Structures are given as C-alpha cells and as structure tokens.
Image (cartoon, grey):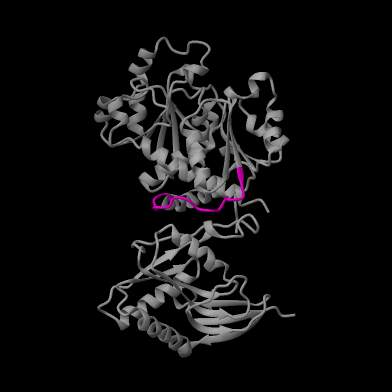
C-alpha cells in the first residue's frame, strides 16, 4: 500500500495532499487508541528515537515524547542547554554521536532555519522537524488543520486567518502551506512590519484591520508575539499591539457569526488573546494539544514503517 | 492464475448456518458473548454471522464490533507500508466471551496480533476463534480455531479469497493458484 512520499518530515513543503490525507486518516485511528483504557500500541517497539531540542519547548516536546512512548518506542531526550553543545560541538558531531548509540529517528528543534534539511543530508537517521527557526513547524500545521477538520468537518473551502507575528513564525508558514494544500482560503493579518513583503506569492490575502479579517474568516489562528526573535522594535509598544490586534470578548461578540479561535501556544494572556476568549467555548486550544499527540503518532508510525 | 471454487451457492449458506448453530450451542442467547470481526476481511464474516443470528434469535441482542490489528502486527517495518483500518467496538468486553472472526486462518499470526489488540479493551473471560476457511498444516504459531467453516489443503504460493455479496456481488470461496 502507498505510504508517505518522503523519508523525513522536514516541512509541509515536502508533503503532497495525499500524504496529508494519509496522516489524517492514520491520526483518526490513533485518536481512538488514545481514548482506550490502554493507550499504548506495540508498533515501534524496535525503534529508538532521540528528541534533540536546541531550543526551549514544553508542548511540542512533551507531545512528541508521549506519542513515542504510546507507540512503544525507546526514547532518549537531549536538551542543548545541558549538553556539550555549550562546549562548542558542531551539530553533525552531536547528532552522529547520538546516532552511534543506534538511534533510528531524530526529532529535532533548532533555532536556525534549514537545520533539519542540513542534517538529513549528512546523517542516516530519519529526521522529523519539530521547528527550525522561523522556517517550518510541520507537525503543528498538521495538528491545526486536523483540528479544523475535526471541528468543521472539512478544511477545503474554509476561510482561515492567521493573526500576529507572521514574520518570525514557523507556525504561520507551515500552516499556510498545509491549508493551501487542503483547499482552504488563507489570510494573514498583522502590522505591516510583521508581515513579510512577498507573502502574497504564497497565494494568501493580506489584511491589516483585525475586525475586517475576523468578519471574513471561519477560523482565527492567533499567533504569539515572538519577542525573543525580535532584535529591533517592530511596533511601538505591546499595549498598542494588543489594542489593534489583540482578540477580546467584545470583538468576538460583535461578529455576526461564531468563529473558531485557535492558538499554537504558549499563550501570552492579555497580549494577543484575552483569558476569557482563550477559555471560551469558541476556543479549541486544548483540542489542538490533544490532537497533537495523535498527529505525531501518525507521522512517526508512517515514517518508521518505511524502513525495510 | 488458475481459480478453483471451493464453496459457493447453497453450500456456502449451509456452512454459515451450521456455524451459527454451533455458536448458539455454546453461547445460548449471547447475553455474555460478543462477536469481533478482524479487519479488513473478517468484518464481513462477523457482520453476516451477526445478521443470521439475529434472524434465528430475534429476542437476543447480538453485539458485533470491528477490530483493526495494524498497530499490533509483528511484520511492521519488515514489509511494505501498513495502513490502518478502523476499530469500532462500542461495548465492553470485560468478562465477556469474545468470539473473534476472520475469513481465512492461515499462519495464525493475524490471530496472535488480534489477541494482543484485544487486551487494550479489557480482560475477556474467554476468547474463541471462528474461521470460515482453515488452511490446514500451514501454521507458524500454535493457534487453532474453535469453529471452522471448511478446511483446505493448500501450499504457500496459493491464495484463498472469500467474496461476499455485500462487497463483491456473490458469496464464494476461491482458491487461486499460480499458473506455472
């Protein structure tokens, strides 16, 4: 039977629509597994996976680790802050040393764009990108689209607006590519300084007025302002940003339809989204987290199944 | 491929009827028993048996579910990509007698995986196996069926295919051989 068209998951760029459908259908099955009394299956019992995180993460790392454990894989964790990387070891050396200990797959997060692609060309293991700089975060995009599909029945034809720091966001790029693959209409919304100049070439609409964007959409994905990646000021103050682009209950209630609110986390409550919206019925933030494990199980299962 | 029909028409129906009566002999009104079809092809057998049992025992509640074993197979990463099917068990199997059903029993490996998969749903009192076709003398592990439709002597290069009215237009068991 046909599997994925790629050996690594480096970005949504490498996937075709059939791959995404296969991942979703497999994730459906894993979601039922996760609702059983015994949530573990033995599929990956002879696979060892290293989670290599050169950048901080809570959700993604926990989610990957849970997915791996529920597939019965052996897991080793590695955080750059407590490792020899701080002694000056190169990326290839670090990973090859880990692979020398017979690791089959590497899940990597790295602050530099393309780190996963670079690694995939130099080491034998299968690589899953868990976020590389401001480039891609494929599993996040897959779980976002999966959550929309779960909530609205389908992704095709739906209107999704991505609000906030598009310039520094790997979630935005992966989401745009994934949603376009699945036939959704995508709009980005934010201050001019945080929208890349050539974003239109990806086939997305651009809007600078939050209210207009929300009136247009079925789903609003609110991104975090990534202050840690901003070395210059992109807007006068956080307070001004919140006034213009923050989502609060008043704006949500003023719309003539119920839109779905998403957030990839971590939330800066009171900045891009207020607490009452984040915790409201319209928010599917925690569904996204739940689906994350099923999506990651599906990706790992389908990739691991390729090895002869 | 040379095709040899092993069972079809009225004989096929008689075999199904016999299996139903044998089940009733051991399970009475099925209040403590459930039927589980193994994906992908065993579900048609389980659905048909459940349908026949409901005709014979109109008062009884016959519970029937589908079990997918993809995640429990022992040949994952040793063959082509495996793609999972749906598991649908909307009832509790704890302390029930489970009758697993598959169309063809061959090496027995599917059944081993199915028993593993079933564990995730609880601890049944007993597990039995019903196979419509038993390919004798070809087991890789010690698994035998409690109820057998027909027994077939075959070699590894041959294939046994069960067709169903619901999906293939007719009820038939066929032995496919390599035309060498």
Q: Which residues are magenta?
A: A34-48
Q: Reply above or below: A305 against A259.
A: below
User: Left or right of A81: which side holds A204?
Assistant: left
Number of numbered callouts drawn = 0
Q: Position of residue A35 (x, y in %)?
A: 39, 50
- A36 in the magenta segment: yes
Residue A104 visible, this orientation = yes
Q: Residue at x 38, y 68 (%)?
A: B125
Q: Quadrant of the C terminus of chain B?
A: bottom right
- What residue appears at the point 70 percent right and 30 percent down from the top-left corner? A92
Q: Position of residue B23 (x, y in %)?
A: 39, 81
Question: Nearest the camera: A118 or A5?
Answer: A118
- Residue name at image x 51 percent, y 39 percent: A65
Residue A184 visible in the current orientation:
no
User: What is the magenta segment's predominant secondary structure?
Assistant: loop
Q: Is residue A84 left or right of residue A139?
A: right
| Residue A41 falls inside the magenta stretch | yes
């Amino acid at each position: 039977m046909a599997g994925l068209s790629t050996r690594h998951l480096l970005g949504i760029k490498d996937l075709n629509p059939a791959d995404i459908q296969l991942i979703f259908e497999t994730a459906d099955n894993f979601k039922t597994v996760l609702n059983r009394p015994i949530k573990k299956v033995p599929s990956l019992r002879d696979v060892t996976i290293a989670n290599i995180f050169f950048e901080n993460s809570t959700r993604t790392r926990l989610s990957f680790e849970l997915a791996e454990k529920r597939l019965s894989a052996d897991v080793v964790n590695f955080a750059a802050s407590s490792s020899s990387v701080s002694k000056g070891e190169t990326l290839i050396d670090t990973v090859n040393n880990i692979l020398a200990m017979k690791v089959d797959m590497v899940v990597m997060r790295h602050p530099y764009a393309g780190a996963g692609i670079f690694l995939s060309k130099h080491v034998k293991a299968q690589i899953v990108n868990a976020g590389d700089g401001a480039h891609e975060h494929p599993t996040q995009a897959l779980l976002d689209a999966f959550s929309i599909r779960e909530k609205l029945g389908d992704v095709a034809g739906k209107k999704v607006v991505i609000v906030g720091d598009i310039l520094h966001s790997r979630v935005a790029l992966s989401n745009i590519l994934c949603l376009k693959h699945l036939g959704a209409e995508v709009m980005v919304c934010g201050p001019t300084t945080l929208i890349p100049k050539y974003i239109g070439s990806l086939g997305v609409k651009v809007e600078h007025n939050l209210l207009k964007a929300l009136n247009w959409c079925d789903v609003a994905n609110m991104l975090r302002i990534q202050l840690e990646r901003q070395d210059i000021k992109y807007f006068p103050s956080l307070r001004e940003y919140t006034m213009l682009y923050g989502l609060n209950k008043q704006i949500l209630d003023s719309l003539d339809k119920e839109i779905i609110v998403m957030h990839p986390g971590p939330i800066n409550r009171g900045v891009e989204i207020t607490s009452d919206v984040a915790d409201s019925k319209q928010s599917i933030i925690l569904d996204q987290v739940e689906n994350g494990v099923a999506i990651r199980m599906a990706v790992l299962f389908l990739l691991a199944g390729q090895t002869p | 491929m040379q095709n040899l029909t092993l069972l079809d028409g009225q004989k096929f129906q008689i075999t199904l009827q016999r299996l139903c009566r044998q089940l009733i002999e051991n399970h009475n009104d099925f209040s403590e028993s459930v039927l589980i079809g193994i994906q992908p092809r065993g579900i048609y057998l389980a659905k048909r048996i459940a349908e026949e049992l409901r005709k014979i025992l109109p008062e009884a509640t016959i519970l029937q579910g589908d079990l997918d074993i993809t995640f429990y197979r022992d040949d994952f990463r040793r063959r082509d990509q495996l793609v999972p099917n749906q598991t649908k068990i909307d009832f509790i199997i704890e302390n029930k007698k489970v009758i697993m059903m598959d169309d063809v029993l061959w090496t027995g490996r599917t059944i081993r995986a199915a028993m593993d998969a079933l564990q995730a749903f609880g601890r049944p009192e007993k597990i039995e196996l019903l196979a419509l076709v038993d390919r004798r003398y070809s087991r890789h592990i010690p698994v035998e069926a409690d109820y057998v439709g027909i027994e077939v002597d075959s070699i590894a290069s041959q294939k046994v295919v069960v067709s169903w009215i619901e999906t293939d237009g007719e009820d038939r068991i066929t032995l496919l051989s390599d035309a060498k």
